[in-house]
Image (cartoon, rainbow, N blue to C red):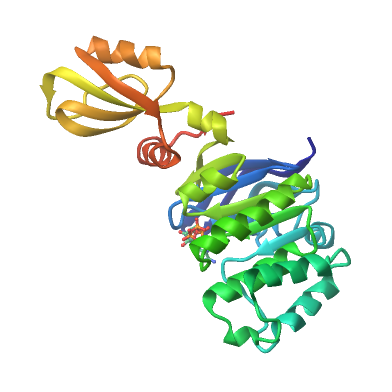
Amino acid sequence: MGQIVDVIDLSRSFGGKRALDGVSFHAAAGQVYGLVGANGAGKTTLLKHLLGLLRAATGSVRVFDLDPVRDPVGVLSRAGYLSEERELPEWMRVDELMRYTQAFHPTWDAAYARALLESFALDPAKKVKELSKGMRAQAALIAAVAHRPALLVLDEPSSGLDAVVRRDILDAIVRTVADDGRTVIFSSHLLDEVERMSDHVTLMHQGRVMLSGVLDDVRRGYQRSRVRFVEHFEQPPVLETALAMEGGGRTWSVVHSGSLEQFHHSVLARGGEVVDSRDATLEEIFLARAGRSRQPVEAA
Ligand SMILES: Nc1ncnc2c1ncn2[C@@H]1O[C@H](COP(=O)(O)OP(=O)(O)OP(=O)(O)O)[C@@H](O)[C@H]1O
């Protein structure tokens, strides 16, 4: 599988504030990468480096094996970008915006752009400045995808879109890109959306990658178990492989990694028993990892 993005040990500060701290991130052709993290985690800063909008201060950024700052033509001609701000020329009509964007991209697929306009029910005659926030997001999304870029970078694509559009259209766009053997990297606050759309997930926290891997491997790597102890604990008892514990007294709910057998063992050693276990949700994993550890974990 062709490697499309290679970010190695990228750090970036704004003033005294560390926005990215030793971030490594890789993306291959035909895969969908979901980037999640709280406000200020560094997602937008990472994405901007891929487009050459920020220059790597330390570390390296390669996209299509090119440096996006030194070779913007080589990178941007093959990339589509939906920025967080959705900057669009206000005075244009939607159809003018499409023609304008087309002028930058010889690979523009006018039929695809028209089909997307129709599926969004977006009026081509409407002025950009008259669009609602959601319509603006839709127009910006079409402008980013209709030239069928080899790499599609979407910063919070669902922001402003209603649930139906998100589920029916955004998902379809992302899947189409991946099915064509192209790559999508998107950031999101919505973990259910990331679980639905991504092949790979990367969790960022305070400028660092906390966890990164194939979504199914990440999911399989963590469980949530209910545990009952004989003894009453005021504070969460120390359990090997436990990342987060909630509860009190004798009953605790634990998000943990590693094998179930190993976990049963450590609970037994503390005089308890595991009542039940299930795979942890991405949200539980994220909260446990972001809350606990500063160490990056490779899940795949
Ligand atoms: N141009 C800038 N000048 C100063 N600080 C910045 C700048 N851009 C980002 N930052 C800071 O860098 C950190 C990371 O910001 P970034 O926008 O990358 O986070 P994010 O994960 O995209 O957050 P959000 O989900 O809120 O969009 C934040 O602390 C932010 O305040």
Q: Can residue 136 be seen in this snapshot? A: yes
Name the residue: 75% across, 45% down: 179
Determine whether, in the image, residue 153 is placed left or right of residue 278. Answer: right
Q: Residue 287 appears at what percent x and percent y?
A: 38, 41
Determine whether, in the image, residue 242 is placed left or right of residue 38. Answer: left
Q: Residue 259 appears at what percent x and percent y?
A: 43, 17
Q: Is the residue 121 above or below the residue 167 in the image?
A: below
Name the residue: 72% across, 47% down: 178
Q: Can residue 69 be seen in this snapshot? A: no
Residue 251, image quadrant: top left
Q: Residue 144 appears at what percent x and percent y?
A: 71, 65
Q: Is the residue 260 above or below the residue 144 in the image?
A: above
Q: Between residues 1 and 211, which one lies in front from this camera angle?
A: 1
Name the residue: 53% across, 66% down: 161
Q: Residue 174 appears at what percent x and percent y?
A: 66, 53
Q: Between residues 218 and 42, which one lies in front from this camera angle?
A: 218
Q: Is the residue 31 above or below the residue 218 in the image?
A: below
Image quadrant holding the C terminus, namely top right
